Image (tube, rainbow, N blue to C red):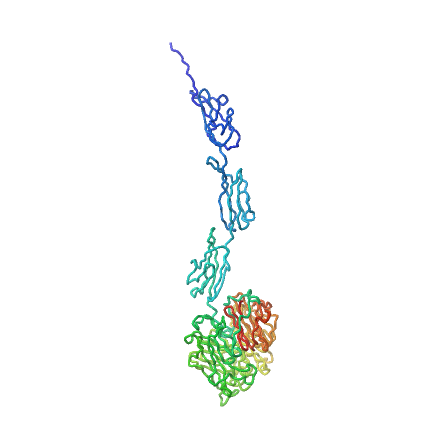
Amino acid sequence: MQLNVSSTVVLNSITVTPANLHVLLGAGPVTYTAIGNYSDGTTQDLTGSATWASSAPAVANMTNNMAAMGSAGSTVISATSGGVTGSTGLQVVVLSSITVTPANQVVVANSGPVTYTATGNYSDGRTQNFTGTATWGSTNTGVATVANNVATLVGGGNTTISATQGLTGSTNLQVVPVLTVSPPTATISILQTQQFTANLSVSWYVDGIAGGNSSSGFISGSGLYTPTIMSVGPVHTITANTTAAPAQTKTASIQVNAPFAGPLTYHNDNARTGLNSHEAILTLANVNMNQFGRLFNIPVDGKVDAQPLYLPALNISGGVHNVLFVATEHDSVYAFDADSGALYWQVSMLKAGELPSDDRGCGQVSPEIGVTATPVIDLSMGPNGAIYVVAMSKNGPGTTYFQRLHALDLTTGAELFSGPKDIQATYPGTGSGSSGGIVPFDPKTYKDRTSLLLLNGKIYTAWASHCDAGAYTAWVMAYDETTLAQTSVINLTHNGGGGAFWNAGAGLTADSSGNIYQMLGNGTFDATLDGNGFPNRGDYGNAIVKLSTASGLSVADYFTMSNSIQESNADQDLGSGGAMLLPDMTDSQGATRHLVVGAGKDGHIYLADRDNMGKINLSSPSVDNNPNLYQDLGAVLGGVFSMPAYFNGNLYYASVSGRLRAFPFSNARLGASSSQSSHSFGFPGATPSISSNGTSNGIVWATDSNLSSPAVLRAYDANNMATELYNSTQAPSGRDSIGSGNKYITPTIANGKVYVGTQNSVGVFGEF
């Protein structure tokens, strides 16, 4: 018989859960469960019957199956039943620190908000992201404010950004200014330097090269830019890089211009515009009594009626200098340092035993006549360049008079080309002073009042009489500048009289095609015209003439008023003023206009089309107009004994006892005056000169001659003539006073200085 034996079931193990906990100190008790695992595969909950224990009661103390945390550390939680024990680890941890990132940042003020992260660091090496639950703050809300975990930049400085969750973690935030460089743009002459400044510590570069080089110009560690001859022309990039983090870069630009190469002729150019558009030093901001004034006076031996000429960077007297050339009525020519007044040379135009001419009984140029016309400079002539001068003299106390053309070396004053050359001429005609059908040029009868013209290798002169004395006519002469030989002569009243060229010292005017434009004084005009509308005897008194130089001097065209003869008879010279060529303009129909402008004693501003000047209209000779003329603005001025100037679409005139006025152009038509000075200029009005830097900082300069008292230099905003920037009477105690004025004074402006001729000196003005 077989016996049935029952199997014995035993407790194999006990599983304690939760297993291997990490619990934050201060958290609530942990409740454990004990599950018995039997040999037959069954389980039984032993939680209530097991005996519970902690291997480190100080870390966690057990009450039944509940563990209460006491301190940080490790312990083993065990449950025992029927001699079997199950256990698990328990780690009681603490929050040891909070890390805030990014840490210790330096940021630029315009870099935008900064986002932070807070990370809790536990004693067991584990971490937890507290970014969304921490409390955020900034110790300096003037630097940055914090909303949640985002810091908004407010201003420069330092602040501490903090995150708090039980503990506090923090980081430093430094906000630095945005890098700035000034000036952002600059234009200078090669004779100048430019200081750039940065608001932070930086390293300087020119065109990407640290410190620059000979091609780009050099810049010092302090930001002082010094140009080189090779840097002239292109725009150069100045770069500043911060030397401390965060890296910042800022750029500026500078253009280096060749120094203003003039004026080497009257009123700066052959168009006689009077404009120096390369003046980078004198501005609307610094031409005022506090920053600008007379620097010094240069004494000379006679009246300075000729406009001083200026040549930059001349190799003279063992160095490179800016040089001012001054001619006087005492027949002297000087070369001065334009920046210090130091004398380099002085030469006399007189031959042995000679004196300057007396005034020939005429007070127009008195008490002596020497060099009256503004000379002209040609840098290509001779070994060092040449200045061409016409001088009048006489043989001591005698009655023989001379007119001579001189060519002087710019560096020594020595005569060139076997000079000087006596000026003599004859011309076929039956006019004043003629004999046997020939009109002679008598040196004592004339003075060279009109400034010299250099055109295509020729020096051109035009001649005025002494008052209206004697038999005189209208001479224009040409001389070869390399030999001083006379090459051509024309007399524009050779069968009549008068017509001499006064022009208030203005120069013969020329266009790029080699045509000369000149305004005659009152004189014979032939009322009988040939088939082409020209005076049949070749007399052009009181007209604007266009002279061709293609094959000697000849009249190509002309304009005069319908009542020209009546005006001449009334001594209303058109040629009391000077002619100026205007830049090409486009009219309302899209056509390009080439215009010449002039005004005289009748106060009209006449604009003639140089391609068809208008000649004369004799159908209504009593009317002061000419329907063939391009434009007659009418009698808008007083009598004109001066030159206009041109700048940026505006024509500037100052007539006798009149205000300095700006007349704007629109569609190649001249409009009514747009602005005017508050000051009125006495006789003979004023010839303005203009300085600008391109089309900016336009300044109109004019001299109030005041023949019996100190001349007054005045400066106006070219965009509003009502704004007087400066005059030389403003400073106290006569600080800026210069000598008595001459009849016609044209200011010379070059590279930050203004030069004004007087009866015995040249006043030099500039920035203090």
Task: Point out the residue furthest to the top here.
Answer: 1
x and y percent of residue 97 in the render? Answer: 50, 39
x and y percent of residue 551 in the render? Answer: 44, 79
Quarter occupied by the N terminus: top left
Task: Point out the residue furthest to the bottom here.
Answer: 436
x and y percent of residue 396 in the render? Answer: 50, 86
Asked whether residue 47 appears in the rendered view, the answer is yes
- At a point 54% along the width and 80% down the height, the residue shown is 502
x and y percent of residue 176 in the render? Answer: 51, 51
Asked whether residue 602 appears in the rendered view, the answer is no
Closer to the camera in the image, 657 or 493: 657
Picture quarter containing residue 623?
bottom right
Closer to the camera in the image, 570 or 562: 570
Is 435 located above or below residue 218 in the figure?
A: below
Is 41 located above or below residue 395 in the figure?
A: above
Give the total of numbered labels. Answer: 0
Is 422 located above or below residue 205 in the figure?
A: below
- At a point 40% along the width and 13% down the height, the residue shown is 5
